[in-house]
Image (tube, coloured by chain):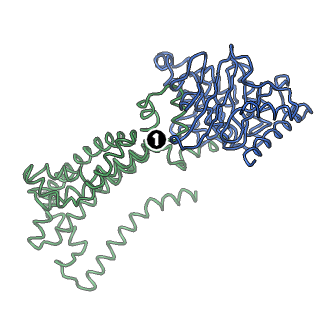
Chain colours: A green, B blue
Amino acid sequence: MRNFAWRRLETTLPWLVILAVFAAWECAVRAFDVAEFVLPAPSAIFASMWEWRLPILTNAAQTLMTSVLGFALAVVIGVVLGAALGASTLIYRSVYPLLIGFNAVPKVAVVPILVIWFGIGTIPAVITAFLLSFFPILVNVATGIATVEPELRDVLRALGASPLDIILKIGLPRAMPYFFASLKIAITVAFVGSILAETVAANSGIGHLMVVASSRFDVPLVFAGLLVTSLMGILMYAIAAWVEARMTGWAVRSVPERSGPVAAVVPS
Amino acid sequence: MAGGRCCEAGAQLEWKTSNPAESDVSHAYVELEHVSLRYGGADGTLALNAASLSVNEGEFVAVVGPSGCGKSTLMRLVTGLWQPSAGQVFVAGNAVSGPLSIAGMAFQNPTLLPWRNVLDNVMLPLEIVRPHRRRLRRERAEYEARAKALLALVGLGGFEARFPWQLSGGMQQRVSLCRALIHEPRLLMLDEPFGALDIFTREELWAILQEVWMARRPTVILVTHDLREAAFLADRVCVMSARPGRILISRSVDLPRPRTLESTYLPAFTALTHDLRTYISEAREQVHA
């Protein structure tokens, strides 16, 4: 019973913390009489969100679309390239330095180039989202495959397994926890990429909405955009975490549904 | 020169042994002829130096030696995972030039796949070894029955759906043993398979391994540093020298089977392990001399 109550508390606690932060924010803004264009109160932000609900929704849909597209591209290319890098030391040694250098380039600097190539709009946002999110996926998949225990490799090779067999039977399944952990990072940075591109050059999307709002000194709407972005980020993170828990439960050994029943099933 | 030293040492101990190089090689299943292995180029470490060993079909041979003497290197050479720098390895009459596909292997670390349950771990070799991998999909039920029977034989009946982390170290090692045996290999290579287990679990697994071996009679090469283990399980015990390793002597174990834990306290058994111990000490001292 006590266990049950504890679990209830664990699930409600995050919501309580969020509520408390908003309440403190609201109180502070009112108590110190902060001007709305410096820091709007949550109530003003929510009011603005409601007032501009239609443009917010359409622009959020655009951002969600570009982020998810960029993320999907990152998953495909990250897994394929990561598998290649993890499977072959030669590919790893030859390609990795280039990838690190590429990853170090600030993506803000890349967006104008993308705009020159593809024009203002959806494509630069998708590509920026992809550029930011594919590296964590690639590194994690490559690590998972490259760190297969040599003894396990020997067991399989002594059975006549081909290198492809070893990747399919051990490398990829073994890389799955790394892969899903990286998805949670990748999906959130995909949003960062999309909005980054939209603030630099776009005519739709949450980033564009925020730029327009700030040029009109409509600070509550800017904050509304931030809030919506963060909500979408949380939603996608939750989906990634859910998939992770379903796919790689074996890596999380303390999952109660798995370790519990051995004792629980025995009739007392 | 190496051979002379070997016989000299053997005479010193008054052993009734046969020099492995002189034993009958015509029926040998595994044959190592003056095999050397050097790591890392011409100036690298010499792990094995002209080691010769022959193992007959269906024979259970244990290789013992001081630590770092190249026992595990020997395993990898026999299974074709590594190629010797000099000399040749023959298995079933053919020179080994690449990984054998007929060998089953088990190591000190059970190396089970954590995302597979016990049954699927045991079935792994069937997804790789020909011709099973082609038949597996159609005849899955029969193969599963075979895996379950094998698990029951090692005392793991009813554990098929468990995951490796739900098992004790000894149980994991039994699963690993089943995985090495499922495709009915003619050659079983065991590299200190019980090294990480406590003594009681280890003794229990000796009996299980003996039972499995007596039922199927594969050719077994067991690498170990446990002399009691070697004497309990093997038909013949080979002693390796310190690095660079070579087989110094081989001695057959004439205890009747099935051997029991009781038989490990018989004078013949203790005398045997004592002799082996003395010989290993000699092998260790040779390094310092």
Residue matched to label 1: A174
Q: Tag 1: residue type? A: Arg
Q: Secondary structure at mark 1?
A: helix
Q: Residue furthest front?
A: B1
Question: Is B171 placed above or below B21 here?
Answer: below
Question: Is B187 placed above or below B205 here?
Answer: above
- Which of B190 and B54 lies nearest the eye of the viewer? B54
- Which of B223 and B107 lies nearest the eye of the viewer? B223
Which quadrant holds the N terminus of chain A? bottom right
Q: Residue furthest bottom?
A: A32
For image coordinates 12% across by 70% down, the residue present is: A214
For image coordinates 19% across by 59% down, the residue present is: A195
Q: Badge 1 sits on which subunit?
A: A
- Which of B74 and A208 lies nearest the eye of the viewer? B74
Looking at the image, residue A189 sits to the left or right of residue A209; the answer is right
Looking at the image, residue A213 sits to the left or right of residue B92; the answer is left
Q: Residue B175: image x %, image y %? A: 63, 33
Q: Residue B267: image x %, image y %? A: 92, 33
Q: Residue furthest right?
A: B267
Q: Residue B144: image x %, image y %? A: 56, 22
Q: Residue A253: image x %, image y %? A: 54, 48
> Residue A6, can we see it?
yes
For image coordinates 19% across by 79% down, the residue present is: A38
